[in-house]
Image: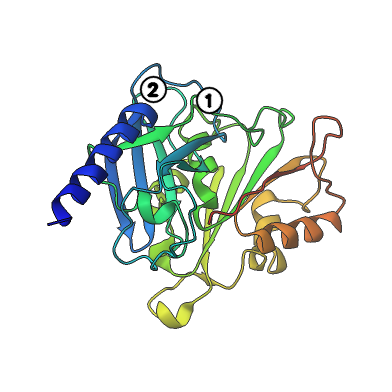
Amino acid sequence: MSIEPEKTTTKTAESTIEKSLYNATITKSDEINHGLLVLRVVPDDNFPQFTPGQYAVLGLPGTASRVEYADPESNHQIEDRSKLIKRAYSVTSSSLKGEYLEFYVALVHSGELTPRIFALKKGDRIFLGKKIVGMFTLQDVPSGNDLLFVATGTGLAPYISMLRSEYDFLERKTIIIHGARTSWDLGYRNMLEALAAKWPNFHYLPIINEIERDPGWEGAVGLVYEFFEDGTVESILGRDVQPADLATFLCGHPLMVQGMIEFLAKKGFTRHSRKNPGSIFVEEYWKE
């Protein structure tokens, strides 16, 4: 006899949360591979302006359902389930069209937010922060510098937005290195291969590190550093890797980012900031 009132109370609570906190609608939720999701969101009101490379905040309350194949959630993991769980995600869509905001999201099975995001369907509601912010953009790159984009996993996201937003494929060389566990984890691969085929100055270098799970893969195997150690990057550039004319962007696993910073430091690269301009641009994030 107590079951029906309990359902009604929960439904009413969720309805109240939706009206007061949700301000955007899911228009696409495409799990391109197990644990990798392309999500499109349209805000209710004004479409936020942003610069390619920046990030937005997404949120869902603790009352939202989790995808069934995520890890079970501890009763003490979230103290107040009526409050929003918020995380920042880099935008992958163009900054010019204003049709939707696209995100590339990896499932953290034990996480608080991503299991709830993966349970969303087209037409569902979500919280979207009013502003899109961040310093991981091309605005501080000196004119004429070639560009090296290095990513692991969903760290690829900000580069996709850059490439979709009137990117200069002619005047500078661009190398994008993407590391993943297997070939089916190489998100946006078709897009990047097509760009590499179209533009002579654009080079896409995918690499995987779990060849035992993907024995049919015929590309590079190992970590992103392989392309430096075997001379691939220098061969594409036609010169040594040097900070005077190469801006390097790093986004992904913290160990990759730290390893690349240490490697590049030996070649004279320094980390960029507005007060102290350098040639290494870093987006530090780690989704949980």
Q: Is 130 above or below relative to 185?
A: above
Which residue, given by chain and number where applicable, does mark 1 sit on? 131
Using a 10 Å C-alpha cutoff, classify the residue at mark 1 as few (fewer than 14 neighbours), some (14 to 19) or many (20 or more). some
**Residue under the point 17% across and 48% down:** 5
Nearer-the-camera pick, 60 or 37: 60
Q: Percent x, y for residue 108?
A: 46, 61
Amino acid residing under circle 2: Gly
Amino acid residing under circle 1: Lys
Q: CA distance from mark 2 to mark 1?
A: 14 Å
Q: Percent x, y for residue 72?
A: 38, 68
* Quadrant (top left, top right, bottom left, bottom right) of the N terminus: bottom left
**Residue under the point 44% across and 40% down:** 59
Q: Are marks 2 and 1 in contact (CB under 8 Å)?
A: no
Image coloring type = rainbow
Quarter-of-image position of residue 60: top left
**Residue under the point 42% across and 53% down:** 114
- Secondary-structure class at tag 2: loop
- Residue lying at the far top of the rendered structure: 46
On screen, residue 76 versus residue 149, left or right, reads: left
